[in-house]
């Protein structure tokens, strides 16, 4: 799965910042809301030279074309603050 991001964000331009990515199990395409549980799928770490977008994340569950996968992303700042989660979904192609 490819995750696009702005590599000028504060977490990306400093050592110690991270983007944490959590994914759901694949769902039927008719499902429009997912509360959880999510599974940690990976992270993108910030650096003095920011990471390049998009980042490729391996899905922790098998998925087939047409299934919907829900995504939760949180950002960790250098001082340890955790952002509110951003939630979205995508359909497997």
Image (cartoon, rainbow, N blue to C red):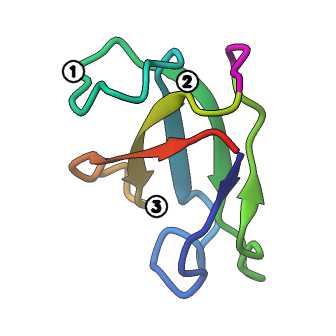
Q: Main secondary structure of the magenta part?
A: loop
Residue occupying the point 49% across, 68% down: 11
Q: Residues within 10 Å of mark 3 (few under 14, many from 20)?
A: some
Quadrant of the frame with the C terminus: top right
Nearer to us of marks 3 and 2 is 2
Nearer to us of marks 2 and 1 is 1
- Residue 12 location, x and y as percent? 58, 72
Name the element at disc 3: loop
- Residue 22 location, x and y as percent? 49, 31
Name the element at disc 1: loop
Residue 50 bears which disc, if any?
none
Q: Residues within 10 Å of mark 2 (few under 14, many from 20)?
A: some
Quarter of the image where one finds residue 14: bottom right
Q: Which residue is mark 1?
A: 35
With respect to residue 53, does 68 lie above or below? above
With respect to residue 92, does 40 lie above or below? above
Residue 62 belongs to the span the image colors magenta = yes
For marks 2 and 1 on the same chain, the one whose residue lies earlier in the sequence: 1
Residue occupying the point 65% across, 65% down: 46
With respect to residue 56, does 30 lie above or below? above
Q: Is residue 33 left or right of residue 63?
A: left
For marks 3 and 1 on the same chain, the one whose residue lies earlier in the sequence: 1
Q: Which residue is mark 2?
A: 40
For marks 3 and 2 on the same chain, the one whose residue lies earlier in the sequence: 2
Distance Cα–Cα, label 3 vs label 1: 28 Å
Q: Residues within 10 Å of mark 1 (few under 14, many from 20)?
A: few
Q: Magenta residues, as a range?
A: 60-64
Q: Is residue 35 left or right of residue 74?
A: left
Nearer to us of marks 3 and 1 is 1
Residue 63 belongs to the span the image colors magenta = yes
- Foreground: 41 or 91? 91
Q: Which residue is mark 3?
A: 78
């Amino acid at each position: 799965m490819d995750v696009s991001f702005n590599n000028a964000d504060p977490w990306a331009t400093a050592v110690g910042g991270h983007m944490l990515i959590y994914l759901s199990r694949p769902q039927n395409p008719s499902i429009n809301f997912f509360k959880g549980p999510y599974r940690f799928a990976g992270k993108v770490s910030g650096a003095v030279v920011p990471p390049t977008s998009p980042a490729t994340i391996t899905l922790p569950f098998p998925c087939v074309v047409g299934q919907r996968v829900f995504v939760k992303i949180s950002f960790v700042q250098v001082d340890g603050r955790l952002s509110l989660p951003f939630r979205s979904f995508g359909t497997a192609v």
